[in-house]
Image (cartoon, rainbow, N blue to C red):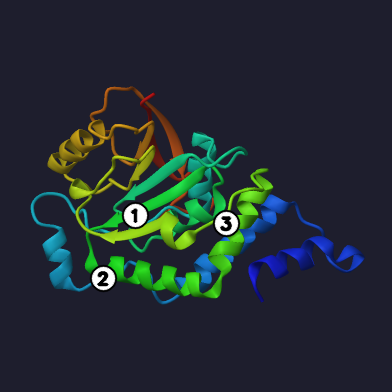
Amino acid sequence: MRAVARVLLLLCAGCTAVELPAQGVLRREVDRVLNTYWRGREGYAISAKEERRINRGDGNPGLYGELAPEGARRLAEEWGLCEGGKAVATFADLGSGVGKLVVQSYLEWPGVHRALGVELSATRAKRALEAWEALLLSDEAFELRQMALNLAGDNDATPNPAEEVKLLHGDLLDADLSDVTHAYVSSLCFPESLIFDVSLKLKQAPRLRAVASLQPLNLDSGARLLALPTSWTSRRGMGTIAHFYDLG
């Protein structure tokens, strides 16, 4: 059953169903599609050859992990991207793995107009595209995005998911960040040299307003700290500390 139909059943069934807050229904639907379309397309297992290629030099940047859906929601709340109003932000996940955060940001955060993911692993980038294309074919991406916009009071916008979400295979240092306003970097295992290069790359992004990183970056702004639930932290734990930078 498609997402909109499921929501209408939940919200309009009267005494035969428990009525849920609309935002809660949207989040449950987003969780469902992430679990459904990414099943069997997880990012943890890649070939030893590919992992060695990614991990050249110091550090272990190929080690995989991802924000939990609740971690993504804390990120959105911190940046005000889950609030009402017109969608004006372009979000980028630099080191996007199988693309779940990119897709969640577009489906669930009404403040995001476009979402971009850049992933160095060819295997993970391929799985991200496969899952996203399957979701596009089901029409659920359109329906959930429309629901998010309607809940935020933006009833005039018509989503175009195929154009507004991009999942790319490539080096994040080569990515075009000219339109990006908000960026997340899953940098926990990045070596010091890569942290330096990523910091320089972000400083050159002309529209960038906010950055979150799992390691401190060399940006012209002090960082505030916030714990984000991740795939490697306990559900009962605080999460992993992220460094938040406001760049104006």
Residue 128 in picture, x, y percent from top left:
36, 67
The correct choice, above or below, for 177 with respect to 29 in the image is above
| Residue type for callout 1 | Gly
The correct choice, above or below, for 142 with respect to 148 in the image is below
Looking at the image, is mark 2 or mark 3 earlier in the sequence?
Answer: 2
Left or right position of 16 against 88:
right
Q: CA distance from mark 1 to mark 3?
A: 18 Å
Q: Looking at the rendering, which quadrant does residue 99 occupy?
A: bottom left
Residue 180 in picture, x, y percent from top left:
35, 41
Q: Which residue position holds label 2?
A: 123
Label for residue 117?
1
Left or right position of 209 against 32:
left
Residue at position x 32%, y 67% from top?
44
| Mark closer to the observer (2, 3) | 3
Q: Which residue position holds label 3?
A: 145
SS for callout 3: helix
Q: CA distance from mark 2 to mark 3?
A: 27 Å
| Mark closer to the observer (1, 2) | 1
Residue at position x 39%, y 56% from top?
66
Tell whether label 2 touches label 1 (CB within 8 Å).
Answer: no
Mark 1 Cα shell of 10 Å, populated few (<14), some (14-19), many (≥20): many
Q: Looking at the rendering, which quadrant does residue 177 occupy?
A: top left
